[in-house]
């Protein structure tokens, strides 16, 4: 049998011509048709998204419970917007590897079943910086989500980093040199006792629910009880993809061939199955992951991690609070077999410029090595006894 030559992920270079071309794209409203999902919101879509995140809050799935809540019916988790338009489309920078580095979201109204959501994505700006061995691009996109009443539901500001793939692999090789820089073992060698302890910790998760968490009762410096995700496996990734929060809508069979002919840099041929796979397969395909990072081990999706933070925050604030904004930075990867603890602490409480009693929360997402893979920040508003204030009165 003839051995086919292995195809690699496209390896472009950040040239002056490419930079000049992208300068002319600033302010462009991007074509998003192939990136949309769940624009017509359903209870099933909300439940599927929550299942993919691992969030069993009854507000997202229990009709009777939700009917008796301040929302008077099922609503979607705030970060459900990721399942409508997850991130800016693949755009420009042909053959250059990309990573979502930072996301900042502002929430104004809940999303409900039977609503239609219009979304748009704008390519705002970028900056090119010199790094060892090449260039790095920091690009900014902005996305808006509007409901059928014309209300802005969410404003989403995204920063991506574009790096030449050979440069990424070289940096990975350098990190692995020497005993002090030894790369982690894949998969992580969990013991049976450790796995049992993780499961017990997961089952102790708390959801505030219908009992109001009043602003006056919150103490600066108090810790949020973490939620635990992992060990991360293929089924966790599949469940998340089925929830719709993936920036790539995979094609099957004939459609893959046709799309590859139009966008060859977005695909590669797997050397084991000979199937055409999207570059997005870095999240579940060892060969793609190694071509991208130099490590033959798949890793999570950045926005997936952000959804875990959303799980933490909405469970903590309860049914009567509101998540005003959240911001996270993605530091490194969460690899399959990792366990992540998402927690936080109350950094500050005050009355903000909107006259609302708010709490600032600093969050983390630590793996089993103690690395914070996603430092984050959020502002929530809570009900207040002294002010007789209920955040949802102006939003529902």
Image (tube, rainbow, N blue to C red):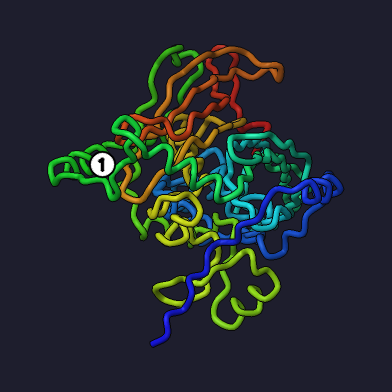
Can you say whether 178 is above or below 293 in the image? above
**Residue sitting at the far bottom:** 1
**Residue sitting at the far left:** 193
Tell me which residue sits at (54%, 81%) in the image: 253
Tell me which residue sits at (57%, 46%) in the image: 99
Give the quadrant of the C terminus: top right
Q: Looking at the image, which is closer to me, 247 or 144?
A: 247
Residue 12 percent location from the top left of the image = 65, 55
Q: How many marks?
A: 1
Residue 44 percent location from the top left of the image = 51, 62
Q: Is residue 153 visible?
A: yes
Q: Which residue is mark 1?
A: 203
Q: Is residue 122 visible?
A: no
Q: Looking at the image, which is closer to me, 127 or 68?
A: 127
Can you say whether 102 is above or below 27 in the image? above
Quadrant of residue 129 within the rendered picture: top right
């Amino acid at each position: 049998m003839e051995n086919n030559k292995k195809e690699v992920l496209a390896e472009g270079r950040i040239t002056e011509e490419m930079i000049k071309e992208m300068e002319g794209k600033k302010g462009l409203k991007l074509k998003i048709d192939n990136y949309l999902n769940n624009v017509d919101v359903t209870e099933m879509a909300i439940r599927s998204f929550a299942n993919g995140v691992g969030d069993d809050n009854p507000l997202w799935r229990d009709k009777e419970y939700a009917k008796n809540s301040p929302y008077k019916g099922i609503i979607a988790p705030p970060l459900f917007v990721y399942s409508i338009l997850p991130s800016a489309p693949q755009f420009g920078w042909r053959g250059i590897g990309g990573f979502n580095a930072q996301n900042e979201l502002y929430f104004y109204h809940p999303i409900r079943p039977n609503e239609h959501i219009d979304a748009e994505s704008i390519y705002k700006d970028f900056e090119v910086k010199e790094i060892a061995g090449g260039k790095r691009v920091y690009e900014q996109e902005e996305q808006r989500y509007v409901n059928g009443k014309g209300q802005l539901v969410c404003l989403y500001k995204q920063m991506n980093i574009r790096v030449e793939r050979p440069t990424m692999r070289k940096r990975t090789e350098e990190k692995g040199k020497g005993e002090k820089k030894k790369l982690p073992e894949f998969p992580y060698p969990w013991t049976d006792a450790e796995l049992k302890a993780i499961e017990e910790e997961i089952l102790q998760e708390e959801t505030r629910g219908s009992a109001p968490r009043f602003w006056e009762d919150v103490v600066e410096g108090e810790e949020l009880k973490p939620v635990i995700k992992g060990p991360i496996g293929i089924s966790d990734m599949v469940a998340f993809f089925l929830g719709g929060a993936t920036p790539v809508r995979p094609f099957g069979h004939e459609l893959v061939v046709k799309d590859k002919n139009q966008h060859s840099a977005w695909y590669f041929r797997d050397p084991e199955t000979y199937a055409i796979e999207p570059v997005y397969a870095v999240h579940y395909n060892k060969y793609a992951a190694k071509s991208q990072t130099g490590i033959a081990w798949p890793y999570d999706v950045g926005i997936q991690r952000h959804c875990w933070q959303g799980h933490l925050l909405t469970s903590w604030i309860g049914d009567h609070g509101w998540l005003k904004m959240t911001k996270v930075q993605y530091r490194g990867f969460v690899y399959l077999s990792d366990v992540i603890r998402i927690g936080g602490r109350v950094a500050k409480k005050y009355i903000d410029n909107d006259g609302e009693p708010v709490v600032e929360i600093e969050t983390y997402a630590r793996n089993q090595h103690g690395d914070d893979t996603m430092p984050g920040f959020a502002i929530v508003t809570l009900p207040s006894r002294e002010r007789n204030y209920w955040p949802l009165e102006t939003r529902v």
